[in-house]
């Protein structure tokens, strides 16, 4: 299916994660569709990713940015405007489940909000004039934690709840500009970060099996590529009348009847 993303300028925050992370996989999938990914992240890994894309003939750039700093976000968007003059799609992907819970300091909680929520607002605010030029669209990457809770991660839960709230708010705000805004909700996805977390546990393999047993479809975690594929469809013209939606790519984890979990 031709998603007509060729030469579209697609900004992806949190794009320089470990190979196989959701952000990196989205970037790779965009490149395979002929889009021009703009990588916004604080990790220098993004330099290598952008260089690899350039070697493939894709006019991609990496903009090193601390997404917890709104002034750096503003400068990043100014760089994008100078180079491309437009943004066709903004994917607010950055997010860290940082464990800022009730036993954390107020400062830790605020820091979590800055990275996981305020960055989303700032990036969208500064990118909006360029999105208005193209009647582009916004895609926010959410988390099931906003809806189910998890325990011990108040900052992340509050942030991702806010991201879902902003998704609907912006969908309403931007109707007049014909700008769509949607969210992808991720549950248990098999990423390098997930593996790293399991490696810290004494019973990592057992924990993984326990989690997978609770995922109705296939008893397995969602692959980052499955998330990326849904992202690309949602930002494309194939979803041209879809806005204000929370799209769950989770194998039924959040919503399906718990009787499915009975062995």
Image (cartoon, rainbow, N blue to C red):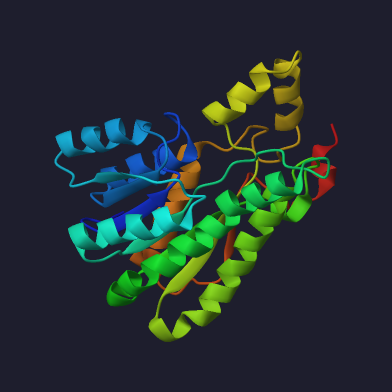
x%, y% of residue 223? 52, 36
Foreground residue, 180 or 165?
A: 165
Residue 1 in the image, given as x and y percentages of width and height = 31, 54
The answer to whether residue 248 is seen in the rendering is: no
Kindly indicate the quadrant of the structure image that contains residue 261.
Answer: top right
Identity of the residue furthest to the top in this view:
202
Q: Position of residue 233 (x, y in %)?
A: 41, 57
Regarding residue 100, the answer to whether it shows in the image is: yes
What residue is shown at x 68% (from left), y 18% (from top)? 200
Is the residue 133 above or below the residue 64 in the image?
below
Task: Look at the image and tell me in which quarter the C terminus lies.
Answer: top right
Q: Residue at x 28, y 30 (%)?
A: 48
Q: Is residue 141 above or below residue 51?
A: below
Q: Residue at x 80, y 50 (%)?
A: 257
Q: Is residue 175 left or right of residue 163?
A: left
Q: Residue at x 46, y 79 (%)?
A: 174
Instruction: Say how many tags the image has.
Output: 0
Say which of 161 and 235 sits in front: 161
Q: Residue 238: image x %, image y %?
A: 37, 65
Asked if residue 1 lies left or right of residue 180, the reply is left
């Amino acid at each position: 299916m031709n998603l007509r993303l060729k030469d579209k300028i697609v900004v992806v925050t949190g794009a320089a994660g470990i190979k196989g992370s959701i952000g990196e996989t989205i970037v790779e999938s965009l490149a395979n569709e002929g889009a021009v990914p703009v990588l916004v992240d604080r990790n220098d890994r993004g330099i290598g990713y952008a260089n690899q894309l350039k070697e493939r003939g894709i006019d991609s750039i990496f903009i090193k940015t601390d997404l917890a700093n709104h002034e750096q976000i503003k400068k990043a968007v100014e760089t994008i405007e100078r180079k491309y003059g437009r943004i066709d799609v903004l994917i607010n992907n950055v997010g860290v489940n940082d464990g800022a819970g009730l036993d954390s300091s107020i400062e830790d909680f605020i820091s979590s909000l800055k990275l996981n929520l305020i960055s989303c607002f700032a990036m969208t605010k500064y990118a909006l004039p360029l999105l208005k030029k193209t009647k582009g669209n916004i895609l926010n990457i959410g988390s099931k934690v906003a809806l189910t809770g998890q325990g011990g991660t108040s900052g992340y839960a509050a942030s991702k709840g806010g991201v879902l709230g902003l998704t609907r708010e912006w969908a309403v705000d931007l109707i007049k500009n014909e700008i769509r805004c949607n969210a992808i909700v991720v549950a248990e996805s098999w990423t390098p970060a997930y593996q790293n977390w399991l490696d810290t546990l004494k019973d990592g393999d057992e924990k993984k099996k326990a989690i997978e047993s609770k995922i109705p479809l296939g008893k397995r975690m969602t692959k980052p590529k499955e998330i990326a594929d849904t992202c690309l469809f949602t930002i494309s013209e194939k979803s041209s009348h879809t806005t204000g939606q929370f799209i769950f790519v989770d194998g039924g984890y959040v919503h399906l009847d718990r009787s499915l979990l009975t062995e």
